[in-house]
Image: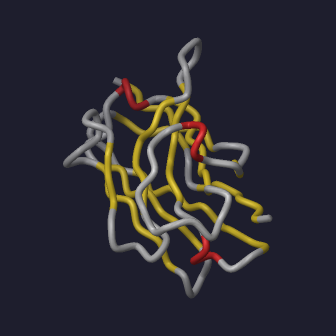
Amino acid sequence: QVQLVESGGGLVQAGGSLRLSCAASGRTFSLYNMAWFRQAPEKQREFVAGISRFGGSADYANSVKGRFTISRDSANAAMYLQMNSLKPEDTAVYFCAADRGGRASFVRTRLDDFDFWGRGTQVTVSS
């Protein structure tokens, strides 16, 4: 199993930036394809960005392309989401997710692709 803990959320004005971190512990970090999801009040959890096991591939939701960048650091067992040009519609709880581990290195985007989740970190963007 892997345990995931998000940090870095907060309140920021529109146009500002935040960097989210996801610290992983447990099994070898490079076993897992990982992703960020978010959930706004009264909305379904949605894919934001995903990264393959070894960091060679990444994908983004259309709504964040060009503004967000996902990355991972195997040495520190951490994943990051750099969020620039934030908009009020980016306001949500952001979750870190990992698949079951040991699968092909591939960017996964579906909610049910992921078996392990953090508790989330709140991001609020004011207008």
> What residue appears at the point 60 percent right and 38 percent down from the top-left corner?
112
Q: How many marks?
A: 0
Residue 99 in which image quadrant: bottom right
- Asked if residue 8 is positioned above or below residue 123 in the image, the reply reads below
> What residue appears at the point 61 percent right and 74 percent down from the top-left corner?
31
Q: Determine the residue located farthest toward the front in the rendered image.
A: 104
Image coords of residue 89 (percent x, y): 37, 24
Image coords of residue 104 (percent x, y): 49, 67
Relative side of 113 to 55, left or right? right
Q: Is residue 26 or residue 103 the one in the foreground?
A: 103
> What residue appears at the point 52 percent right and 35 percent down from the top-left corner?
38
- Asked if residue 91 is positioned above or below residue 117 in the image, the reply reads above
Image coords of residue 48 (percent x, y): 41, 41
Q: Determine the residue located farthest toward the left in the rendered image.
A: 66
| Quadrant location, the N terminus | bottom right
> What residue appears at the point 41 percent right and 67 percent down from the top-left corner?
71
Residue 29 in which image quadrant: bottom right
Q: Is residue 15 or residue 111 the one in the foreground?
A: 111
Image coords of residue 127 (percent x, y): 33, 23
Residue 93 in which image quadrant: top right
